[in-house]
């Protein structure tokens, strides 16, 4: 793309009052942006309103600054990263998004140079969206990380939204299994690609750029506006063969992603959880509506043959060392196992544990602290504790 071509696309896409649908209609009627911009107001008004035609012929003062900033961003990527702006007319534009109801006019992309070869951008054919709560339970975060890691080991690209919670855990899990074969993970963000939101994920975003792609449809400088995040969810669903919801409340952006995936004819999967956890209620609702209940990556791969292969199973836990002849088993181990059984997998408070086990509060707190340090128990807000299963 030349600088002038970029300026024309930006002028078309940044004109107030022109959305993706209107811009696609103009392109279909007149051709490339340069051809659209060359039309008279009378010609333009054959398919847009007079106010829209006037706005197109009278660009805002901010447009020139946006054009200059975008060209500078595009041409100044620090090695080994590359940056691209894809348009609807590009051969590299992802075909899966063209099949959706509202493909964006422009896509901004950052990633490692290894993903941008002489043949252009190789969008992964095997991709699964993994989404969920911004405030997951410890178990939910472990599930997201473990599922994403196993998927990435199978050569499946994990698509998510770089939000806190499940999204971040999914990206991190995929990065742990990254290879040079294809992008491990794609982060679809709801801001300009020159911004990272939330700021807490700045380092994670840098790692994704090294081992995957960051994608945005929003112009540079776009702040984190609330209305943009549900809108970007259609891209998360559209870039993947299916969507896995790990945890989600009943009013959740993750359910928006699942609905959009379903509307696009993609599969929806959900991991069940505790009946007492608000973060599980959205998943349970999806399962009641027909989403596939999954307990392992194999459940997903069986339903989506396009993702290929059989999932790698997690290695079995090493057996505990045998006791010396005649030696009694460790009392501490027995106590820990008994306490873990009493915990179950639902959040529980100290009083309930005391009632279940008959152990006094002081001793319980000591044992729980030891299990917490071992990574077998998590401490939750409100004085609750939860057992952590292996991912």
Image (spheres, rainbow, N blue to C red):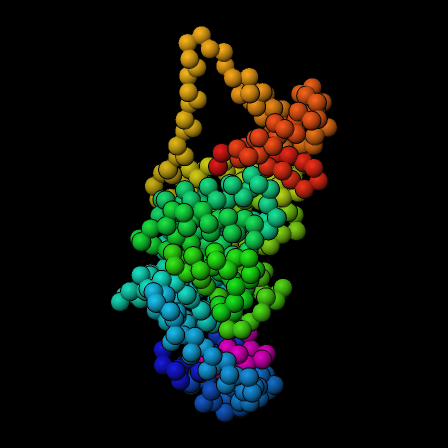
Q: Residue furthest left?
A: 118
Residue 225, picture quadrant: bottom right
Q: Is residue 23 above or below residue 251?
A: below
Horizontal arrangement in the rendering, residue 173 relative to residue 254 (left or right): left
In percent of width and height, residue 28 lies at 44, 77
**Labels in figure, total:** 0
Q: Is residue 65 visible?
A: yes
Q: 51 or 171: nearer the eye?
A: 171
Q: Is residue 104 above or below residue 255?
A: below
Q: 174 or 87: nearer the eye?
A: 174
In percent of width and height, residue 77 lies at 38, 71
Does the magenta segment cover residue 12? yes
| Residue drawn at x 37%, y 37% as measured from the top left | 312
Horizontal arrangement in the rendering, residue 7 relative to residue 132 (left or right): left
Q: Is residue 128 visible?
A: no
Q: 14 or 375: nearer the eye?
A: 375
| Residue drawn at x 44%, y 69% as measured from the top left | 108
Horizontal arrangement in the rendering, residue 51 relative to residue 243 (left or right): right
Query: Where does the N terminus fall, quadrant-wise?
Result: bottom left
Does the magenta segment cover residue 186? no
| Residue drawn at x 62%, y 52% as measured from the top left | 252
| Residue drawn at x 39%, y 35% as measured from the top left | 313
In magenta, the rendered stretch is 8-20
Q: Is residue 185 above or below residue 354?
A: below
Residue 318, picture quadrant: top left
In percent of width and height, residue 11 lies at 49, 82
Q: Is residue 386 above or below residue 213?
A: above
In percent of width and height, residue 295 lies at 49, 36
């Amino acid at each position: 793309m030349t600088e002038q071509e970029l300026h024309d696309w930006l002028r078309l896409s940044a004109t107030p009052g022109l959305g993706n649908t209107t811009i696609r209609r103009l392109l279909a009627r007149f051709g490339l942006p340069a051809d659209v911009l060359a039309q008279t107001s009378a010609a333009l008004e054959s398919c847009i309103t007079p106010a829209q035609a006037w706005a197109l012929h009278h660009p805002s003062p901010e447009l020139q600054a946006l054009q200059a900033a975008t060209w500078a961003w595009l041409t100044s990527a620090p090695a080994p990263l590359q940056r691209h702006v894809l348009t609807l007319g590009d051969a590299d534009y992802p075909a899966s998004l063209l099949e959706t109801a509202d493909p964006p006019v422009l896509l901004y992309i950052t990633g490692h140079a290894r993903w941008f070869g002489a043949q252009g951008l190789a969008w992964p054919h095997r991709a699964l969206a993994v989404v969920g709560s911004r405030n997951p339970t410890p178990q939910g975060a472990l599930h997201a990380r473990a599922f994403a890691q196993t998927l990435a080991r199978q050569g499946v690209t994990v698509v998510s939204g770089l939000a806190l919670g499940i999204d971040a855990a999914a990206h991190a899990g995929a990065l742990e299994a990254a290879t040079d074969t294809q992008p491990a993970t794609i982060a679809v963000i709801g801001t300009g690609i020159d911004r990272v939101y939330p700021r807490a994920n700045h380092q994670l975003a840098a790692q994704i750029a090294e081992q995957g792609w960051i994608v945005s449809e929003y112009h540079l400088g776009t702040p984190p506006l609330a209305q943009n995040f549900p809108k970007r969810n259609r891209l998360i669903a559209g870039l993947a063969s299916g969507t896995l919801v790990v945890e989600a409340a009943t009013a959740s952006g993750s359910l928006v992603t699942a609905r959009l995936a379903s509307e696009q004819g993609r599969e929806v999967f959900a991991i069940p959880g505790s009946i007492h956890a608000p973060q599980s209620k959205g998943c349970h609702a999806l399962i009641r509506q027909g989403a596939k209940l999954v307990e392992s990556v194999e459940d997903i791969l069986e339903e989506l043959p396009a993702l290929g292969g059989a999932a790698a199973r997690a290695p079995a836990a090493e057996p505990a060392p045998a006791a010396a002849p005649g030696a009694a088993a460790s009392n501490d181990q027995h106590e820990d196992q008994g306490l873990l059984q009493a915990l179950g997998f639902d959040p529980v408070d100290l009083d309930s544990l005391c009632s279940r086990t008959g152990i006094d509060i002081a001793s319980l707190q000591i044992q729980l602290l030891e299990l917490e340090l071992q990574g077998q128990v998590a401490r939750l807000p409100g004085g609750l504790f939860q057992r952590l299963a292996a991912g």
